[in-house]
Every structure is written in C-alpha cells, then in structure tokens.
C-alpha cells in the first residue's frame, strides 16, 4: 500500500482564505480589525522567525498585528505588566507570549496572567479545564490543527482507536482530550510506555508528538491507519554540513502501510499558524459580543 498524503499546506491555505473572509466580516460589523498581540522576549533565532511569520500571516488575514519585543534580561514584572496592559487593551483580542522564555522567567506565571478569554494559545489552566469538561474555550493550535486534518480525511472519528504518543500540555494532552470528545477510544503513550510498538499497532489513528526523529517505525502501523506526524526534527543530511527535517515517524516505512500520512514538512506545521489566526478571530467575535456561525471555521 502507498499511503495518501495529507496536504496540511493546502488545507492551511484554504483555512486562511476562509479566515480572511470572516475577518473582513468582523471589521465591517465591529468597525475595527480583529487584533492579535505577540510578545517576544529576547532574540532566540527560531522564535524570531516564528514571530515574524505569525505577524505576517495576521496582516495577510486582514487582522491587526501588535508585536511587542522585550530584551532577554527583561524582569518578570516588566513582562507581567505588559501582559496585563494587553489584557485591558480593547483593540487586542488575542495574546500570545512566544515560548520558550529566558530561564529567569517562569512560563506558568506568565501564562496564568494572560486573560483566559484572550489566551489564543489555549495554554491557560482555565482553557485546559474548559477543554476537559467540554465547555467552549481556546484549544492549543497544533492539536486543533491535527483534529481538523483528521476530520477532513475521515469524517466521523466515533469509535476509532486513537493512540497519541507524547503527553505534553501543548500537544499530547489536549490532542487526547479532543479525540475523546470525538468519541475515539484514546490511549496516551509516552517514554515509559511498555511495548509501544504493540500499543501503536492497535490504532486506527496515530498522532506522534514525541520530538524523537523517526522513532515510530513503519511496521508499528496498522494497515490503513491514519498517521499524523507532529514532529519537526532537524537531522544531518546526506551531504556533509547539510541538515534536513524529519518527523517523529519513519515516513518511508509508514508510507508502505498507512492509509494516509502527513509529510514533514508540509503536514501539521502549516496548520499551527492557520489555527492561531482562527483562534484570534474567534476571540474577536466573542470579545465584541458578535455571533460567529457554529462551525464557520
Ligand atoms: N513556541 C513554539 N510554538 C509555540 C506556540 O504554539 N505558542 C507559543 N506561545 N510559543 C511557541
């Protein structure tokens, strides 16, 4: 079997188009643009690239982007004061503080200071709790993007066996909650799981989010299963000095067995920013007290 490729890049592009249409609708109805504030502390190279592309995508969607940069040695008070000011700013619908933060800043304290109704990352415990009990809130962007790809491919997920490999607060745990809410039978596997290959072999849906290059082997996959690879790992390339990106799944091996699989790059990656824009727009509609049709995005 040769697995079908799940084109996250194309799906994300389409989603961003729909968001732009709804963002224009928001502007027409509210008299202002939906606003997303991104805070970057320090000058981490990868974070700078992410923040720049988030800002660009926000503007392309017809939303307002507010970028705030603080020096690497900014105090916790300085950062918390900025977050509180953004909480109170009526032009800011969503707030994202780019992680990781420099070591002297406590990420949990910062996340706890963001208003849950502007927490477009879905990292605040209030939003984690809302997801756990099935109340409307914000869901972390990467797992929500994975769920969109799965539903687009499979339709109803009800009754399917799903294995999530990885138990992070950002991906693994919310992914498991989302799949449970879709009535999957969910297993969360992690570094201490025994007989991981056998656990994965039961799954109709595999979501790999462990951050270990090509750890999930092709012969672990149930024939016909749908594989979502969240991993983005940089490894040595074929030529000296060159690197390449690989996922957490042995892509070539899995392609022979799976029914469908996300490539790396071009699978889950592009979905994260698209869902961030989606969350920011949903925040804008909610904060402005405007109706957004159920399932519109
Ligand atoms: N750093 C890498 N990915 C993310 C993300 O999705 N949100 C935040 N806040 N920081 C990140």
Image (spheres, helix red, strand yellow):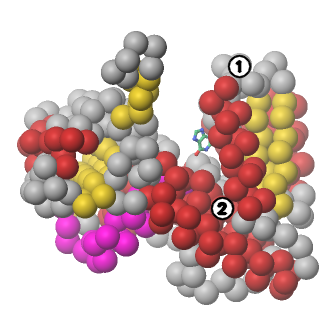
Does residue 229 appear to the left or right of 1 in the view shown?
right
> Picture quarter containing residue 240?
top left
Single out the mark in the foreground, 2 or 1: 2
Q: Few, some or many C-alpha atoms within 10 Å of disc 2 (few <14, some 14-19, many ≥20)?
A: many
Does residue 120 appear to the left or right of 243 in the view shown?
right
Q: Secondary structure at mark 2?
A: helix
Identify the residue at image location x=20%, y=57%.
3
Identify the residue at image location x=48%, y=63%.
10
Q: Can you name the residue that lies furthest to the top here?
A: 240
Does residue 261 appear to the left or right of 218 in the view shown?
right
Q: Can you name the residue that lies furthest to the front here?
A: 239
Q: Earlier in the sequence, mark 2 or mark 1?
A: 1
Magenta segment range? Answer: 138-161
Q: Few, some or many C-alpha atoms within 10 Å of disc 1 (few <14, some 14-19, many ≥20)?
A: few
Residue that numbered label 2 is attached to: 277
> Mark 2 near mark 1, Cβ–Cβ under 8 Å?
no
> Picture quarter containing residue 39?
top right
Labelled disc at residue 104: 1
Total labels: the figure holds 2
Instruction: List x then y, in percent, for residue 170.
Output: 49, 45
Q: Secondary structure at mark 1?
A: loop
| Nearest the eye: 293 or 191 | 293
Task: Assess whether residue 152 is covered by the magenta stretch.
Answer: yes
Does residue 233 appear to the left or right of 55 in the view shown?
left
Which quadrant is the N terminus positioned in?
Answer: bottom left
The correct choice, above or below, for 12 with respect to 173 in the image is below
| Nearest the eye: 282 or 216 | 216
The alpha-carbon separation of the residues under discs 2 and 1 comes to 29 Å
- Determine if residue 243 is in view: yes
Instruction: List x then y, in percent, for residue 140.
Output: 54, 54
């Amino acid at each position: 079997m040769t697995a079908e490729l799940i084109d996250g890049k194309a799906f994300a592009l389409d989603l961003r188009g729909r968001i732009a249409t709804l963002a224009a609708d928001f502007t027409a109805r509210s008299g202002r643009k939906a606003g997303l504030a991104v805070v970057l502390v320090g000058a981490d190279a990868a974070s700078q690239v992410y923040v720049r592309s988030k800002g660009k995508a926000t503007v392309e969607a017809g939303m307002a982007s507010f970028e705030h940069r603080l020096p690497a040695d900014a105090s916790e008070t300085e950062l918390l004061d900025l977050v509180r000011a953004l909480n109170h700013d009526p032009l800011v619908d969503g707030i994202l503080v780019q992680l990781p933060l420099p070591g002297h800043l406590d990420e949990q304290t910062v996340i706890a200071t963001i208003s849950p109704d502007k927490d477009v990352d879905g990292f605040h415990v209030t939003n984690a709790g809302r997801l756990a009990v099935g109340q409307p809130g914000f869901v972390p962007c990467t797992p929500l993007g994975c769920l969109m790809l799965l539903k687009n491919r499979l339709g109803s997920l009800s009754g399917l066996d799903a294995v999530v490999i990885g138990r992070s607060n950002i991906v693994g745990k919310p992914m498991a909650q989302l799949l449970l809410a879709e009535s999957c039978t969910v297993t969360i596997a992690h570094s201490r799981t025994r007989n991981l290959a056998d656990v994965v072999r039961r799954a109709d849906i595999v979501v790999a989010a462990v951050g270990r290059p090509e750890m999930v082997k092709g012969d672990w996959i149930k024939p016909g299963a749908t594989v979502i690879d969240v991993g983005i790992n940089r490894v040595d390339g074929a030529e000296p000095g060159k690197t390449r990106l690989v996922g957490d799944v042995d892509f070539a091996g899995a392609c022979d067995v799976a029914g469908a699989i996300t490539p790396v790059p071009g699978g889950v990656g592009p979905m994260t920013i698209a869902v961030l824009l989606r969350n920011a727009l949903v925040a804008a509609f909610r904060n402005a007290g405007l109706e957004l049709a159920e399932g519109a995005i």
